[in-house]
Image: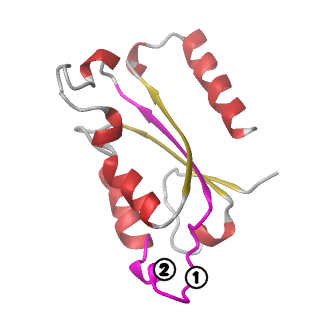
Amino acid sequence: MKNILIFTLPLSGKKTTQIYDRFVFQFPLIWFGMPPLLRLWIDEVFDRDWLKEGEHNPLEGKEVYILVTTGGKERSFSKTGTYEYTIDELISGLIVSLKVFKADIKHIKIVYEANKLSKKEIILHKKEFTELLNQ
């Protein structure tokens, strides 16, 4: 079994990136982006020195799964939708940061209209995501 870090509060620091094999970023879309606390964590933990020749990059090759929830409808998050941007575009700061540090983004799951899900639908999404993590 791999060591998995699921980001919850309080968030851990730089040492955390070294001891886990897999990272799960689970967060609600807030004002068309990632939550400010997650952005702050990235600013404080990710270190550009990791990209220097000969430096250890603790994110390189680590598996990453991203689970984003939003109250909006799927059709609203498209070029022709209400917001004219996809969720991937809105969270591109996270995606680019992870790619720069050579993390291995395995899957991005988006749950639309999360505030309207029934208990049965929540259980189904949980099952699907758990199956992804167990592959």
Q: What residue type is labelled 2?
A: Trp
Q: Is mark 2 on a helix, strand or loop?
A: helix
Residue at 53% x, 51% y: name it.
Answer: 7
Task: Tell me, yes or no, whether the two marked residues, 2 and 1, touch with CB atoms within 8 Å.
Answer: yes
Residue at 38% x, 72% y: name it.
Answer: 44
The numbered mark at residue 56 is: 1
Task: Name the outermost residue toward the right.
Answer: 1
Residue 35 visible? The answer is no
Q: In this view, does 5 lie above or below 89?
A: below
Q: Position of residue 10 (x, y in %)?
A: 49, 58
The numbered mark at residue 123 is: none
Residue at 18% x, 28% y: name it.
Answer: 84
Residue at 42% x, 77% y: name it.
Answer: 47
Query: Considering depth in this image, is 59 or 123 the residue closer to the camera?
Result: 59
Query: Considering depth in this image, is 70 or 60 the residue closer to the camera?
Result: 60
Q: Decide which of tag 2 and tag 1 comes sooner along the chain.
A: 2
Query: Considering depth in this image, is 106 or 116 the residue closer to the camera?
Result: 106
Q: Give the range drawn in magenta.
A: 46-70
Q: What element carries label 1?
A: loop
Q: Position of residue 86 (x, y in %)?
A: 29, 32
Residue with the mark numbered 2: 50
Q: Does the magenta stretch include residue 5?
A: no
Q: Where is residue 58 in the image (x, y as percent from the top left)?
A: 58, 72
Q: Is residue 42 above or below residue 9?
A: below
Q: What residue type is labelled 1?
A: His
The image quadrant where one finds the C terminus is: top right
Query: Considering depth in this image, is 61 or 64 the residue closer to the camera?
Result: 61
Label 2 Cα neighbours within 10 Å, binned few <14 / some 14-19 / many ≥20: some
